[in-house]
Amino acid sequence: MINFLSGAAAMGFAAGGLCFLRFWRSTRDRLFIGFATAFWLLALNHTIVAIFNIPNEYRSWVYLLRLVAFIVIIAAIVLKNLKGNESS
């Protein structure tokens, strides 16, 4: 059951990444490509946990993908705000 829910979460993250990719294609705003990349990293994280059935004790290295995803989100937001201040 846990693997099924992890797969459903991975599918949701991947679908969210595709939505952000569509927004990026229409606007060419780097914020959207940052969010798409982060969502795909989160989907990859859930996929790895579900497919390889890694015990809880050894999952810490997999969660580095989550850390990278959140760093990508923060960087995209900061870059968007810096770009907005320069054009004002």
Image (tube, helix red, strand yellow):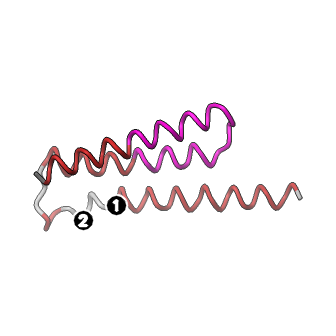
- Disc 2 vs disc 1: Cβ atoms closer than 8 Å? yes
Q: Is 50 displayed left or right of 18 in the figure?
A: left
User: In the orientation shown, which residue stands out farthest toward the right?
Assistant: 88
Secondary structure category for the residue under label 2: loop
Q: Does the magenta stretch include residue 7?
A: no
Instruction: Give yes or no for residue 18 being in the magenta stretch.
Output: yes
**How many angstroms separate mark 2 from mark 1 (CA)?**
7 Å
Residue 2 percent across, percent down from the top left = 14, 54
For badge 2, the amino acid type reads Ser
Label 1's element?
Answer: helix
Image position, residue 37 (x, y; %): 48, 45
How far across and how far down the image is residue 81, in percent? 72, 61
Task: Report the span colored magenta.
Answer: 14-40
Q: Is residue 79 left or right of residue 13?
A: right
**Most extreme residue toward the bottom, as rendered?**
57
Question: What's the magenta bit mostly, secondary-structure-wise?
Answer: helix
* Residue in the image at 24% along x and 65% along y: 60
Quarter of the rendering containing residue 21: top right
State the mark number for residue 60. 2
Residue that badge 1 annotates: 64
Residue type (three-letter) at the residue carrying disc 1: Leu
Q: Which quadrant: the C terminus?
A: bottom right
